[in-house]
C-alpha cells in the first residue's frame, strides 16, 4: 500500500492550485482541532484534568445547534452561539457540583479520580443521548450554499463561513487568555497555583470558569461542524482523539502549541488523505505523534 502511494505521488504533477486547495482544506480541519485542543489544554493546564468527556461536549453542541435551528428557525451562526452558551452553563455546573467535591476529597489521587469520573460521565452522556434520540444522524443541509472559484481554487461558502467563524473564536480566546485580567489569572494559576493563591486569586472560581470555557469551545466546535459531521451519539469521538493528538504534538498546557499543533495536524491530514488512501489517515497521524514524542517529548512548542 505504501509503495503504491509513493508511485502515485511520483506520477502526480505538482499543481500549485491543487496544493493551495489542500492547504485551505487543511486549515479548516486544523482550526477545529485547535478549538478542541484549547479546551483540553485549559482543563489540563489549570485543573490537571484529562477530560475524556470533552468529545461528548462536542456532541452536545452539535445536537443543541440542530434543535435550535429546527425548533426556532434561527440563523445557523446564532444557533451555534446559543449552543455554546448552553455548553458553558453545563460545564460550569459539572465543575461546581461534580468535579469540585471530588477534588476536595481526592488529595494526591485527584488526577486519576478525575479521569475516571470524566470517563464515567462520558458513558452516561453518550448512552443517555442514544436512549433519547437513538443512533440516527441529524444534519442541517443547505447552510450557506454555493461556492466561488479563485484562480482554480474552489471555496465552498459553507466551509468558508465555518473557517472564518472558527478563526474568530480562536482569536477571541487567545485575546481573552493573554490580554484580560481573568485570562491572565487563569494562566497564572496554571503555572503556579500556590503563587496565584498568594496573589489573592479565587482558585475555585478560575477552575469553574476554565472548565466552563473548555465546554463552550467544544460546543462551538460541534455546532460549527454540524453541517459537515451531523449530530449522533458518537460524533465527538474522532474530534476528541484528534484533540489529544494536537495536545501531544503542541505540548501539554501550551495554548500556543494547541493553535499551531491543530493547524499543523489539519494540513498534514489534508495532504495525507490525498496522497494516501483514506484508511491510512489515522495511522499516519499516530506515526506523526510518535515521531514528535520520540524526538521532542515535551511537544513542539514551549508551555505558555
Image (tube, rainbow, N blue to C red):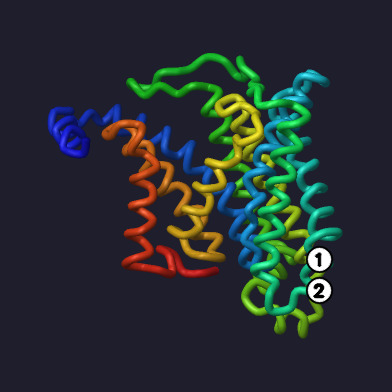
Q: Is residue 87 left or right of residue 48?
A: right
Give the alpha-carbon distance from disc 2 to disc 1, as whole Å. 6 Å
Question: In the picture, residue 249 is in which quadrant?
Answer: bottom left
Q: Where is residue 247 in the image (x, y as percent from the top left)?
A: 50, 58
- From this view, report whether residue 270 is shown above or below residue 188: above
User: In front here: 285 or 21?
Assistant: 285
Circle 2/circle 1 CB separation < 8 Å: yes
Look at 69% across and 41% down and name the residue there.
Answer: 219
Q: Where is residue 9 in the image (x, y as percent from the top left)?
A: 18, 33
Q: Residues within 10 Å of mark 1 (few under 14, many from 20)?
A: some
Q: In this view, does 26 lie to the left or right of 135?
A: left
Look at 69% across and 64% down and name the residue there.
Answer: 114
Residue receiving disc 2: 104
Q: Residues within 10 Å of mark 2 (few under 14, many from 20)?
A: few
Look at 33% across and 52% down and name the residue there.
Answer: 287
Residue receiving disc 1: 100
User: In front here: 50 or 250?
Assistant: 50
Camera sees residue 229: yes
Image quadrant for the N terminus? top left
- From this view, report whether residue 286 is shown above or below residue 99: above
Amino acid at each position: 500500500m505504501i509503495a503504491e502511494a509513493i508511485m502515485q505521488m511520483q506520477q502526480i504533477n505538482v499543481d500549485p492550485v491543487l496544493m493551495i486547495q489542500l492547504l485551505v482544506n487543511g486549515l479548516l480541519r486544523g482550526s477545529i482541532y485547535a478549538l478542541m485542543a484549547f479546551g483540553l489544554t485549559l482543563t489540563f493546564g489549570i485543573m490537571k484534568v484529562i477530560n475524556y468527556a470533552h468529545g461528548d461536549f462536542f456532541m452536545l453542541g452539535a445536537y443543541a445547534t440542530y434543535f435550535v435551528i429546527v425548533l426556532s428557525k434561527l440563523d445557523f451562526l446564532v444557533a451555534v452561539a446559543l449552543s455554546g452558551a448552553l455548553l458553558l452553563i453545563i460545564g460550569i455546573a459539572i465543575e461546581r457540583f461534580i468535579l469540585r467535591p471530588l477534588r476536595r476529597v481526592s488529595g494526591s489521587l485527584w488526577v486519576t479520580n478525575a479521569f475516571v469520573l470524566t470517563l464515567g460521565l462520558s458513558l452516561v452522556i453518550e448512552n443517555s443521548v442514544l436512549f433519547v434520540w437513538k443512533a440516527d444522524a441529524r444534519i442541517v443541509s443547505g447552510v450557506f450554499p454555493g461556492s466561488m472559484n479563485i484562480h482554480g481554487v474552489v471555496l465552498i461558502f459553507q466551509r468558508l463561513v465555518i473557517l472564518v467563524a472558527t478563526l474568530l473564536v480562536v482569536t477571541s480566546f487567545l485575546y481573552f487568555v493573554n490580554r484580560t485580567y481573568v485570562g491572565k489569572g487563569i494562566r497564572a494559576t496554571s503555572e503556579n497555583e500556590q503563587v496565584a493563591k498568594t496573589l489573592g486569586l479565587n482558585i475555585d472560581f478560575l477552575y469553574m470558569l476554565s472548565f466552563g470555557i473548555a465546554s463552550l469551545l467544544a460546543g462551538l466546535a460541534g455546532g460549527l461542524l454540524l453541517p459537515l459531521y451531523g449530530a449522533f451519539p458518537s460524533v465527538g469521538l474522532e474530534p476528541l482523539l484528534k484533540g489529544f493528538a494536537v495536545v501531544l504534538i503542541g505540548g501539554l498546557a501550551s495554548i500556543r502549541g494547541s493553535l499551531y499543533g491543530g493547524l499543523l495536524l489539519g494540513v498534514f491530514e489534508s495532504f495525507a488523505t490525498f496522497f494516501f488512501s483514506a484508511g491510512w489517515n489515522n495511522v499516519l497521524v499516530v506515526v506523526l505523534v510518535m515521531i514528535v514524542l520520540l524526538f521532542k517529548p515535551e511537544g513542539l512548542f514551549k508551555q505558555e
